[in-house]
Amino acid sequence: MAFTTKASIASFGGKLLKLTHASSSTGTEMAVNVFLPPQALTTPPQKVPVLIFLSGLTCSPENCSEKGFLQHAASRRGLAIVYPDTSPKDVDIAGAKDTYDFGEAASFYIDATQAPYAGVYNMETYLATELPATLFADAELGAFFDAARVSITGHSMGGHGALTLYLKNPGKYASVSAFAPISNPSKCPWGEKAFGGYLGPDRDEWKKHDATELLAGWAGQDLKALIDVGTGDNFYKQGQLLPENFEAAAEKAGVKGYEVRYQKVSFPPSPFFFVLFFWSRFHG
């Protein structure tokens, strides 16, 4: 087994596994939590669809798996959830822990090109290629996952990551959903700080990692995308999320098949309902 199991916890009839593994992309040990629904834990194991959940700034695999409880709804739908980490952790990089919105737990899910993060913060490669390949090929875990049915979702910074990975890899994910996503990071303070530090000053490079900018070159069919934003969210009010820019870019590019919903609350009323409503919308 490529993974070391740190804990196995009974959760809504299934199992929540806390795992670590050596990553060739980051050159570090990476943590990942995996929820296996009861439908997978049969004899022989049944392959179930997979949802990858990307967390936001300051988070770890524990935040959503232990506080969001997506497992509750996932267990009813027979859905496995993969909770990756938000960056390599405990790496000896000066300044990586100085602020909450850059460095550790704030990778923005991209491959950094600027020192000292280049060669370590290869989160795009890790998430799009290494982690799913390692999970699906694992001698034990691979028996549970249907690699042909994978979707991606995320919150805030994770919503940005989910949208960009979906747009960069047409056909790789069955659907994408995001709540309170950083939708246009090259034009908001969080994204400008992160992209400047990880990618350097060339704003044309930034556009390659910005969901709103990527819409102009979308090569796939209609999007299967749902975005939820709370209009009471302070970060929305501060111009950090910019979902309106995403909508405008999609309209300009003639992109169809997406929905942006504005909730009159600071947060979608039920994240797990939102995620699984979206999944069921396209998968029955």
Image (cartoon, rainbow, N blue to C red):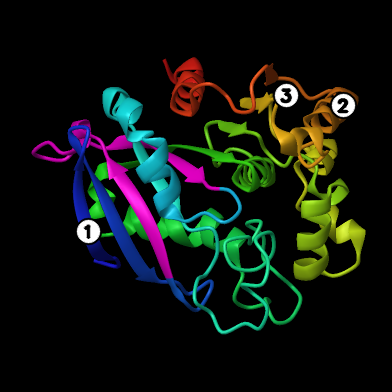
> Please, is residue 128 above or below residue 21 in the view?
above
Which residue is pictured at 63% across the width and 62% down the height?
107
Which residue is pictured at 61% across the width and 53% down the height?
57
**Residue mark closest to the camera, 3 vs 1:** 3
Q: Position of residue 147 (x, y in %)?
A: 39, 43
Q: Position of residue 69 (x, y in %)?
A: 36, 35
Q: Which mark is residue 106?
A: none
Q: Find the residue positioned furthest to the left.
A: 43
Residue that carries the numbered disc 2 in the rendered image: 248
- Tag 1 or tag 3, which sits nearer the N-term? 1
- Tag 2 or tag 3, which sits nearer the N-term? 3
The residue type indicated by label 2 comes to Ala
The answer to whether residue 260 is visible is yes
Mark 1 and 2 residues: CB-CB less than 8 Å, in contact? no
Residue that carries the numbered disc 3 in the rendered image: 231
Q: Position of 20 compared to 173: left or right?
A: left
The residue type indicated by label 1 comes to Ala
Residue that carries the numbered disc 1 in the rendered image: 7
Mark 3 and 1 residues: CB-CB less than 8 Å, in contact? no
> Please, is residue 112 above or below residue 143 in the view?
below
Q: Quadrant of the C terminus?
A: top left
| Classed neighbour count for the residue bearing mark 3: other residues with Cα under 10 Å, few (<14), some (14–19), many (≥20) | some
